[in-house]
Amino acid sequence: MRNLLVTGGAGFIGSNFVHYMLEKYADYRIVVFDKLTYAGRLENLERVSANPRFAFTQGDICDLDAVRAAIQQHNIDTIVNFAAETHVDRSIMTPDAVVRTNVNGTWALLEAAREQKLERFHQISTDEVYGAIPAPQRSKEGDPLEPRSPYSASKAGAEHLVYAYYVTYGLPVTTTRGSNNIGPFHYPEKALPLFITNAIDNIPLPLYGDGMQMRDYQYVIDHCEGIDTVLHRGALGEFYNVGTGVETHNIDMARGLLDLLGKPHSLITFVPDRAGHDRRYALDTSKLQALGWRSSHTFAQALEATVRWFVDNEEWWRPIKSGEYLDYYRRQYVER
Ligand code: NAD
């Protein structure tokens, strides 16, 4: 493994992964292949843009010829696929884009990887593929997948294709299922960065339903370390959960960030719940821990680091919260 094609590397987790890998492995070259949708931002990669071991190609993962060309041009041996339409609320408004990128796009990448006999195809998946999990149960990798939103269903479909390419064609694949990430470069349509940036401006925090949904919030770098562990020590054809194993109610997440910012809890405003909103996700991460990985940030540490980053990087998020973003915000929270 030397030449990685990181698809979706201009997004939140992908860009953190690129920073992490270039720092950790002095002999790795990384090519980011990204369509630059509203969620993909070149400024997320500014820090590495002058690095001779880094290159960027704008392209759509659904475009098989473009993927083939990038693999050949850069002598790629490994694909790590982060590229996706990732927002559940948008997947409910416009499911077609989600199916196209997450399912058809993953297929095109697999096909190119098979043709060109790559050494590894790694798929980034999500804990949402398990569906809502009643307490005190925790999802294990062998559990049935019961996705309940267009987003999670498309991610489950992609996973099935990845596994099918392993069984049918012998493509060397691995898959990680990560829980909710938080950290730098998180696009402010997702709950936590939306709440932080609203709170900074004293705008109400729109909290779905009763706010008692439970999520396993992990710091993005812990997730990147988990992916790195599976890339180097994971078994082919296997799935690995990546998370802290600790759940937080969404209302406590909101109260926690308001406390850190010194803002009143009265900024929390309850809004009608998301259709089909999963109540709880919870992961058993013992399989990944057996490979030597540990999540190293508690929720409190991850929240504090994330809030600090958004306070220190207003020039990153302020321009995003305009134009197309405001149209989306109005449709999602004002006109419903
Ligand atoms: P993001 O929305 O911030 O970034 C997605 C990136 O993919 C963007 O850069 C976008 O331009 C790119 N992209 C979208 N469609 C594309 C296409 N057709 N071709 C090429 N590039 C395209 O997403 P994220 O939160 O960083 O998530 C990355 C991956 O991790 C996704 O696969 C997601 O399902 C998975 N995941 C996310 C979380 C989370 O909490 N954010 C948790 C678990 C798994």
Image (tube, rainbow, N blue to C red):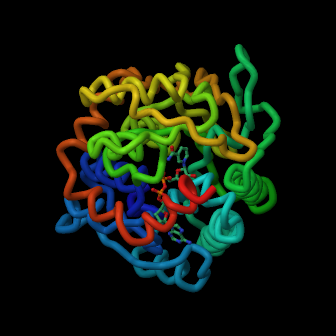
Q: Position of residue 254 (x, y in %)?
A: 43, 30
Considering the image in quadrants, where does the N terminus appear?
A: bottom left
Q: Is residue 297 above or below residue 108?
A: above
Query: In the rendered image, is residue 179 in sight?
Result: no
Query: In the image, is 178 to the left or to the right of 198?
Result: right
Considering the image in quadrants, where does the C terminus appear?
A: bottom right
Rendered residue at 80%/40% (across/down): 146
Q: Is residue 117 above or below residue 301?
A: below
Query: In the image, is 116 to the left or to the right of 36?
Result: right
Rendered residue at 38%/63% (across/down): 10
Comparing 325 with 50, the one in front is 325
Query: In the rendered image, is residue 236 in sight?
Result: yes
Query: In the image, is 78 to the left or to the right of 105?
Result: left
Q: Position of residue 151 (x, y in %)?
A: 67, 54
Q: Quadrant of residue 93?
A: bottom right
Query: In the image, is 86 to the left or to the right of 160?
Result: left
Q: Position of residue 253 (x, y in %)?
A: 45, 27
Comparing 319 with 155, the one in front is 319
Comparing 28 with 43, the one in front is 43
Rendered residue at 41%/46% (across/down): 194
